[in-house]
Amino acid sequence: MKALDRKLIRDLWLMRGQALAISLVIASGVATFILLASTMDSLKLMRDSFYREYGFAEVFSRLKRAPEGLKERIEEIPGVELAETRVVADIRLEVSGFGEPVSGMLVSLPPERPAHLNRLYLRQGRLPDPDRDDEAVLSEAFAEAHGLGIGDTVKAVIEGRMKELSISGIALSPEFILQVRPGALSPDFKRYAIVWMSRDAVEAAYDMEGAFNDVVASLSSGADPSRVIAGLDELLARYGALGATTREDQVSHRYLTEEFNQLERSATIFPAIFIGVAAFLLNVVISRTVSTQREQIAALKAFGYGNFAIGLHYVQLMFLIVIAGTAGGLAAGVWLGTRLSELYMDFYRFPHLLYDLRPGVVIIASAITGAAALAGTIFAVYRAAALPPAEALRPEPPARYRQTLLDTLGYGRVLSQPSRMIIRNIERRPIKSLLSIIGISLAGAILIAGIFFNDAIDFLVDVQFRLAQREDMRVTFTGPVSWTALYGLEGVEGVYRAEPARSVPATLRFRHRSYRTAVQGVAPENRLQDLLDTDLNPIEVPPKGLVLTDHLGSILGAGPGDLVTIEVLEGAKPVVEAPVAMLVKQYIGVSAYMDIDELNRLAGEGRAVTGANLVIDRARLPAIYGELSGMPRVAGTAVRTDDIRNFYETQAEVFLFFTFIATLLAATIAFGVIYNTARIALSERSRELASLRVLGYTRGEISYILLGELAVLTLASVPLGFLFGRGIAAYMVNELGSDLFRLPLVIDTSTYAMSAAVVLGSAAVSGLIVRRRLDRLDLVEVLKARE
């Protein structure tokens, strides 16, 4: 073994504590990158595989009723490769032992063959017998939520008639990977189901023999979707079509896309921050570690080793640390990525878990950390090796000692001699002190960036579900109904108040931009749902004009005073212009609002409502459910507390997983940075501190001098970490916003306190370890080392 190789092993052993701390910093950055990137790739792989193998359609259109013979004309539209017609309807279900109402979507299946598009993946059982009208396939998420299996039965209210259905199969569909009720914010597997029955049975139930009300289609290679949609809309306009949409607007796909976009941005932002911070810290730590071996480098040069051999030696030393950190980060990232993918499988229903760790992800993570380590090592070694051996072997000349700022201001006398030493040492090495402060503050900043999601989600839920929405229950009707339906709801025992709700699907256009959404009608006398201005103060909806959420205004590029075109997608489909009256703040969803009478006039359907918001006696909730289930026009209900719980169980659960991981990794980085800062300070100043001991200073005093400096640097880093953390959080809020929800920039005092506590705690632990080493300092050995 060569001498340098033996030195390499010896150095690694001597600096094992520092090497471990640096490896942990690297591992934290690599693990974050692997975790997010591999989870993103895995979800995309599972989605694309499911779409491809089970023929997920690319164009969708709902209508009232059209003859089956129209299918051939649909397939003749240029760009349409294959079209299938279906009968789709909203239904209500009753599950034995579950007292709450369940809404669902009933989808017909071709009678004599499997569908070509949106085929089912049967997890259990078989498709319904075409000759039986009482068999159905249930969506897996709903069946699991209620413990239903093959042969069990559920009751369904189909077209006003109660029917008992026998479960013949449990299935997944690429159309319902995320099984979420239209208009809901998050999935509710217990209260929303997808039910598939044979086409003949559904046609008979809805009197749709020889007709359809839903069409799906795939596109030919290179087809222009907009031209296909235009052709489909033109063909189906007379049959009450609501307007064809591409896959991008399909509910499940849209939610998935938003989630994936958010995850993809997280997979870019988090690792960039972690690895960027880790790279910075790595450079600081490595360059200072190498500089402490300045005399060893000079000695090697004096014995004939060239600059290349010395540089290669230190590069090998650092690469061994980097490899250990990268390997640890890779293992941790794969384990965490698998766990996160499994967590997503609870919400996204794919046939199989396919974990995908691409070689490119590993190469990128390794290359970034390796390049950061190399840059830090080469620069530091070159600087040390550039010195002539005779000069480098001599101790560094003492720094020029001047009066400190405190001395100049006349406050130096109030400080003890050790305290003045601390101030003086910080002042004479301002760059080194500043880098230490920045390094520690970045560790604190990462903690804030990881924890603030909790604060943001709590604030979002508080604003959306407690400040803006105060109803106990929302009722949705099967379609627009007369205003008098409210009186029927208010007549239910236990219902104290019923307020109208109106929703009209529409496409809003401003200049070259457009967005498909629903315009919500708000009655001036409503008190259960408030619109909030950008300062979160409640406002009244104006009698004229359109109120846009700030996010929708940003999408359209429209503001107060601008004329927006409203293309209504139901009824007579009028196209009108309305001025934007104001913008309101809303963190969830993308909506527009109008006075309900003005909206009804616009839709041309008289005084109608599509739902109601209720204040109820929660003690009578089961009885209210029973009353509502007997109303044929009631399509579904939603309880606000259930919405909050579902939101936390879906969106928040994933964010909280990120928060836990980010906190854990950030705490590791904080400890790694501070421990290395303390250890390097001890290495750099051991001779000085030993000299002070010989001159009569006690162990406590020299510990105070060394650890006092660390304490000053740490305390100075805390407020800077707050600023960095808020800046990173602001950047993430801006980048992670989506149509589903936008996170507010809210950071609680407890989050700042947590960040400071972790940093100060890490500093205390590091200080105790260094103090232990300081107490065991061999004065004779240290002082004779340079003789």
Image: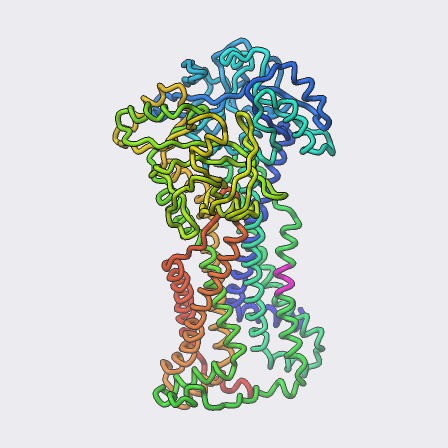
Viewer-nearest residue: 276 or 689: 276
Q: Position of residue 692 (x, y in %)?
A: 43, 87
Q: Quadrant of residue 249?
A: top right
Quadrant containing the N terminus is: bottom right
Magenta-drawn segment: 368-372
Residue 371 colored in magenta in the image: yes
Q: Quadrant of residue 199?
A: top right
Viewer-nearest residue: 28 or 754: 754
Q: Is residue 544 left or right of residue 786?
A: left
Q: Position of residue 665 (x, y in %)?
A: 48, 57
Q: Position of residue 254 (x, y in %)?
A: 56, 37
Total labels: the figure holds 0
Q: Quadrant of residue 491?
A: top left
Q: Is residue 623 at least partly visible in the picture? A: no
176, above or below 778, in the image: above
Q: Main secondary structure of the magenta part?
A: helix
Q: Position of residue 84 (x, y in %)?
A: 63, 21
Viewer-nearest residue: 673 or 103: 103
Q: Residue at x 55, y 62 (%)?
A: 278
Viewer-nearest residue: 655 or 783: 655
Q: Residue at x 67, y 21 (%)?
A: 74
